[in-house]
Amino acid sequence: MLSDKMQEALNDQLNAEIYSSYLYLAMQAYFQSKSLTGFANWMQVQTQEELTHAMKFYGFISERGGRINLKSIEAPPGDWESPLAVFEAGYQHEQLVTGLINKLVDLSLAESDHATNTFLQWFVSEQVEEEDNASTVIERIKLVGEAPGGLFLLDQELGQRTFTPPAASAE
Ligand code: FEO
């Protein structure tokens, strides 16, 4: 059984993951408006990933006998200065999410809620990957910088990203 405080905190994270999905959807739309379809594809995969994160929280709260409490989803920004600015915003967002996950881990330890702590470990590892994914693209954008056709080639590469649902064992 979840404590009221833990249930509330997990519901807040469910909301944060849905917001993440919404944010990347806005970024997808930005790239589509610029005809950078590979970048848009990368964001579409990210949007889907965030929804699976949200549903992991949904499933865990339910499994522990908690109540799902869906809250308003904040509107994301709709425009950025450049592709680099988009990924920098995404990277910053992932750092913020890492902080939220760490706070949840702290709460689970304070409450000796070992089941929640174990559940959260998947997200601790996932956030390392999430931050790395965003910072890798930032480095690539900086690398191609002014090179003619650089952004076009990167767009083709990012178009190769595919969505892989999390393994059943990690659900
Ligand atoms: Fe759900 Fe991008 O962290």
Image (spheres, rainbow, N blue to C red):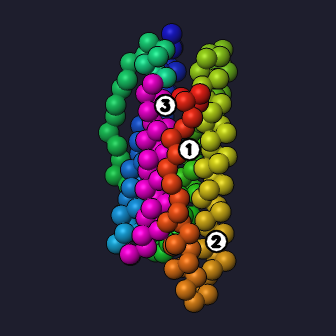
Q: Which residues are magenta?
A: 34-59
Query: Is ligand 1 within 8 Å of the beta carbon of the residue shown at mark 3?
Result: no
Q: Main secondary structure of the magenta part?
A: helix
- The residue drawn where x is 57% and y is 50% is 94
Q: Is residue 152 magenta?
A: no
Reading the image, the residue beneath label 1 is 97
The Cα atoms of the two marked residues, 2 and 1, are separated by 23 Å
Mark 1: amino acid: Val
Q: Which mark is residue 69?
A: none
The Cα atoms of the two marked residues, 1 and 3, are separated by 15 Å
Give the percent coordinates (x, y) of residue 137.
61, 65
Query: Is ligand 1 within 8 Å of the beta carbon of the residue shown at mark 1?
Result: yes
Reading the image, the residue beneath label 3 is 56
In depth, the one of 40 and 73 nearer the eye is 40
Is residue 12 visible in the rendered image? The answer is no
Is residue 82 visible in the rendered image? The answer is yes
- The residue drawn where x is 43% and y is 27% is 58
Residue 103, relative to residue 96: is it above or below?
above
In the rendered structure, which disc, 1 or 3, sits on the residue that comes first in sequence?
3
Circles 1 and 3: CB distance less than 8 Å? no
Q: Secondary structure at mark 2?
A: helix
Circles 2 and 1: CB distance less than 8 Å? no
- The residue drawn where x is 49% and y is 14% is 64
Q: Secondary structure at mark 1?
A: helix
Reading the image, the residue beneath label 2 is 140
